[in-house]
Each structure stands twice: as structure tokens, then as C-alpha cells.
Image (tube, rainbow, N blue to C red):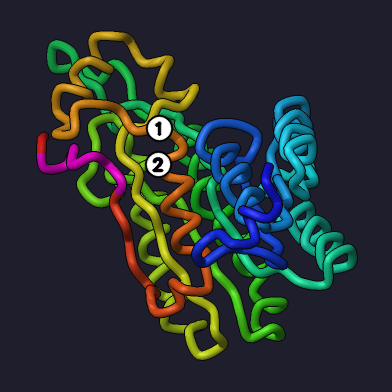
Amino acid sequence: MDNQQSTEFPGGLKDRVAIITGAANGIGRATAHAFAAAGATVELWDLDQEAGDATATAIVNAGGIAGFSRVNVANREQVDEAVASICERHGQIDILVNNAGIVRDGQLVKVKNGEVVKQMSQEAFDTVVSVNLKGVFNCTQAVVPTMISQKYGRILSASSVVGLYGNFGQTNYVATKSGVIGMTRVWARELGKYGITANAVAPGFIATEMVKSIPPKVLEHMVAHTPVGRMGQPEDIARTYLFLAAESAGFINGAVISVDGGSVLGT
């Protein structure tokens, strides 16, 4: 990484400390690299120890500042301990990227020949809610007191285009992503007076490890219904987070930015 270039990044993040959840792979990893290149100190949280350590090491080897902690965002005690450690080591938390998320897809009720043959389990619903919604609440509530004392902060949360428009077989996931939008708008109202902004990003179909596991015919259908003619890359989302994290984006608050190549229009 060219340190001189990173300090001159338009709206750069020099001297900022950022927490990125779900940072070991995919969008989180791309965001960690983008933030570090823009001069931020990045604290990476994930459950994947090996991939998280590798991401942090790659950033450090490129000249950035990064650390990894194994944190389950659904576990409030772990979140509080990790936040306290960052405050002790760095004395500040400027940016939170609520990126961690999981899927446990299934129809609400599946009927065959007039009989219920399957339905979404309570466990599948609760597990997704605990990570994708409660986890966002946990992390945000844990960092906000520090941001209030600083009179500065950026809260960025991952929603999804399906949180705006729904999606077959994703009652649990869609509920959480819609909930993230609602919480973001509440926090924009509650925290703006402290110099803290809250915004959400709604990715479309992004070429992450999770999406790449989808059958090829389904992926082809997704691309065919995306006006720009391709799937998104993790870097497309990372650049959006980077824009919103900058001091220059301080008048954007309570927004939901779709980054989907126009796929909603094409469906």
C-alpha cells in the first residue's frame, strides 16, 4: 500500500478507527482492505479465525494497520469485551460497519398435493434474527456511547435489495434486512445531534462465496435480470461503504443506498 497515496484519498480515513463485522471473507474483507488503503485502522471481527487472521495479515503486509478478533455479534458479552479492548488500545471508535450476516433459507410453508410437507423451522428463523438483526443492535449499542463522547461517528449497516422488495423462501432473512433499514432510520434521528450518521447499504447479487454456491442456471438468471449485465463484486459494496464512512459524507443520514446494478428494475 502506498501510504502517501492513502493519506491523500479524497475523503480519506486517516486517523480513523473502524470496526468491520463479518470481515474475514467477501464484502467484509473487501471493505477492510478499502478502509485500510484509505488510511484507517481496521479492527476485523468474524467467527472464521483462519480467514480473519489471513485478512488482517494481508492488510498489515500491504502497509496498513489491522487486527482480528473472533467475535460472535449475537453474543453481547463478546461484543462488549471487544469494544472495550479497542477503546483501551486506540482510544476511539469512529466507524462501525455492520456487515456480518447469515442465511437459512426455506419457505414459510411448503405444500404438496394439498399437504404441508415442510416449513421454516423456529431454529432457522431465530438463528438468522440473532445474527442479522440482534447482532446489528448489539454492535451499534456497544459503540455508540464512545461515538457520543467523541461527537463523531459513522454507523453503516448491511441491508439487501430483498429487504426492500422481498424474496421467495427468505422470510427470516428479509425480516432482518427490513429491520436493519428501520433501525437505521431510528438511529439517524436519535444520533444525528451527536455528529453520528447512520446509513444502510442494500446490495444486489454480489459474487461472494455464499452466492457462488448457487446453481449455475440460477446465477445465469440473476445476471440476465441485471441491467448492467454482470454480478456485483465485493469491491462495489466496499467502495460504497468507503464513501459513506468519509467525513465528507456527513450530510447523508438515514439513507438506504441500493448497489445492485439496476437488478430491481430488471426483475
Q: Is residue 121 above or below residue 28?
A: above
Residue 249 is marked as none
**Residue type at numbered disc 2:** Asp
Asked whether residue 162 appears in the rendered view, the answer is no
Residue at x 55%, y 56% (from the top left corner): 136
Residue 233 is marked as 1
**Residue type at numbered disc 1:** Gln
| Position of residue 3 measured from the top left corner of the image (x, y, whole percent) | 70, 52
At numbered mark 2, what does the secondary structure look like: helix, strand or loop? helix
> In terms of image quadrants, where is residue 116?
top left
Q: Are marks 2 and 1 in contact (CB under 8 Å)?
A: yes
**How much space separates mark 2 and mark 1, taking CA atoms?**
5 Å
Which residues are drawn in magenta? Answer: 259-265
Residue at x 29%, y 16% (from the top left corner): 117
| Position of residue 8 measured from the top left corner of the image (x, y, whole percent) | 59, 62
The residue tagged 2 is 236
> In terms of image quadrants, where is residue 267?
top left
Q: Residues within 10 Å of mark 1 (few under 14, many from 20)?
A: some
> In terms of image quadrants, where is residue 56?
top right
Residue at x 82%, y 61% (from the top left corner): 86
